[in-house]
Image: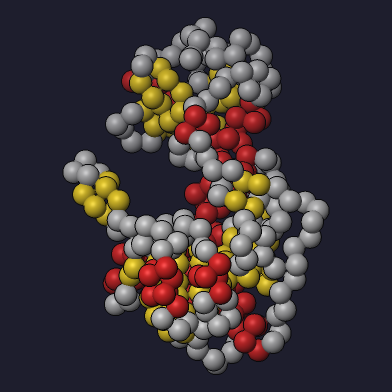
């Protein structure tokens, strides 16, 4: 590993980005400033809350900047004035204009949670699980003006197991991303890693998750719904008596009936093809619970049709 320590700008917002920032600091790089999305209102009191990256950077004594846009010439000038060797970008949430991409001496590097060119875009973790991919990973790339189209420096693969949900995959990939960005920067400094153009074959786009996608449509095949429950974890839901019930774990089974019809006394629900066994649920305002615990307080007899 290279002994050269870089002057970096870090740009990220959610908890997925924090391990990368920590890894860069642990490797001895000098983080000049952190860019993160502005604090947002959250919780019952609607208090302004800094992003996970913002909070971690402040705890490390690093300057945090929260521009609403990077298109303003003054913001671009302030960024360039940092005189950084490189910028590392991880789920930042703002488009980087060409002036920002060009400012660091070595350019801007992105940690992307897929094996590019598969799943370019906003939701690669969710879309990989939803599609039934058997593997995914992390790609470190040099950024250009396109959407995740820049040349690749380094990648690593991880298997997507049959029961892995989006949170579990997220946690594995964010740790991997932190390790790989340190390796990639060292490789670039030493000349061991040369950017490789992404292949034209195999490009797919991971569109942003729409809230409407999180509601279970019982007309869909059960195997698709089981993957959706894992992919959208913990947001998938159905409605019962006007109340939302989240589905946290579910498996597809070979059974048939009218879509939405409860087929037994243990939360097996008919789908467009097959049936979905609800294993763990979370009623509105309550903790997650196993299906049998839910049914003790909320009996749901065979023959009931869910919306």
The residue drawn where x is 39% and y is 32% is: 282
Quarter of the figure with residue 227: top right
- Is residue 70 rendered to the left or right of residue 135? left
Q: Nearer the viewer, residue 79 or 122?
A: 79
Q: Nearer the viewer, residue 233 or 278?
A: 233
State the image coordinates of residue 222 (x, y, percent, origin top left): 64, 25
Quarter of the figure with residue 261: top right
The residue drawn where x is 62% and y is 46% is: 206
The residue drawn where x is 29% and y is 72% is: 59
Identify the residue at the far top of this view: 303
State the image coordinates of residue 111 (x, y, percent, origin top left): 57, 65
Identify the residue at the far left of this view: 45
- Is residue 85 rendered to the left or right of residue 159? left
- 168 vs 187: above or below: above
Q: Nearer the viewer, residue 166 or 85?
A: 85
Quarter of the figure with residue 163: top right
- 161 vs 271: above or below: below
Identify the residue at the far front of this view: 73
């Amino acid at each position: 590993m290279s002994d050269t320590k870089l002057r970096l700008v870090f740009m990220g917002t959610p908890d997925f980005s924090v391990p990368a920032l920590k890894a860069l600091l642990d490797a001895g790089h000098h983080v000049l400033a952190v860019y993160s999305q502005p604090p947002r209102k959250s919780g019952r009191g609607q208090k302004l809350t800094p992003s996970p990256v913002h909070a971690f950077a402040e705890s490390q004594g690093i300057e945090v900047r929260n521009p609403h846009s990077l298109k303003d010439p003054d913001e671009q000038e302030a960024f360039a004035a940092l005189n950084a060797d490189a910028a590392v970008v991880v789920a930042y949430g703002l488009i980087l204009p060409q002036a920002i991409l060009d400012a660091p001496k070595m350019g801007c590097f992105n940690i992307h949670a897929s094996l590019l060119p598969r799943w370019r875009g906003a939701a690669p973790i969710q879309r990989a699980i939803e599609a039934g991919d058997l593997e995914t990973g992390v790609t470190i790339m040099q950024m250009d003006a396109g959407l995740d189209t820049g040349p690749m420096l380094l990648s690593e693969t991880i298997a997507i197991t049959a029961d892995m949900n989006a949170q579990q995959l997220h946690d594995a990939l964010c740790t991997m991303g932190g390790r790989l960005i340190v390796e990639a920067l060292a490789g670039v400094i030493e000349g061991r890693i040369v950017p490789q153009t992404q292949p034209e074959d195999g490009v797919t786009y991971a569109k942003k998750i729409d809230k409407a996608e999180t509601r279970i449509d019982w007309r869909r095949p059960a195997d698709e719904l089981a993957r959706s429950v894992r992919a959208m974890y913990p947001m998938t839901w159905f409605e019962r008596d006007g109340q939302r019930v989240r589905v946290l774990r579910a498996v597809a089974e070979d059974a048939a009936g009218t879509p939405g019809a409860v087929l037994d006394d243990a939360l097996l629900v008919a789908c467009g093809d097959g049936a979905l066994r609800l294993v763990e649920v979370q009623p509105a305002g309550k903790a997650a619970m196993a299906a049998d615990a839910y049914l003790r307080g909320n009996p749901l007899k065979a023959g009931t049709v869910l919306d």
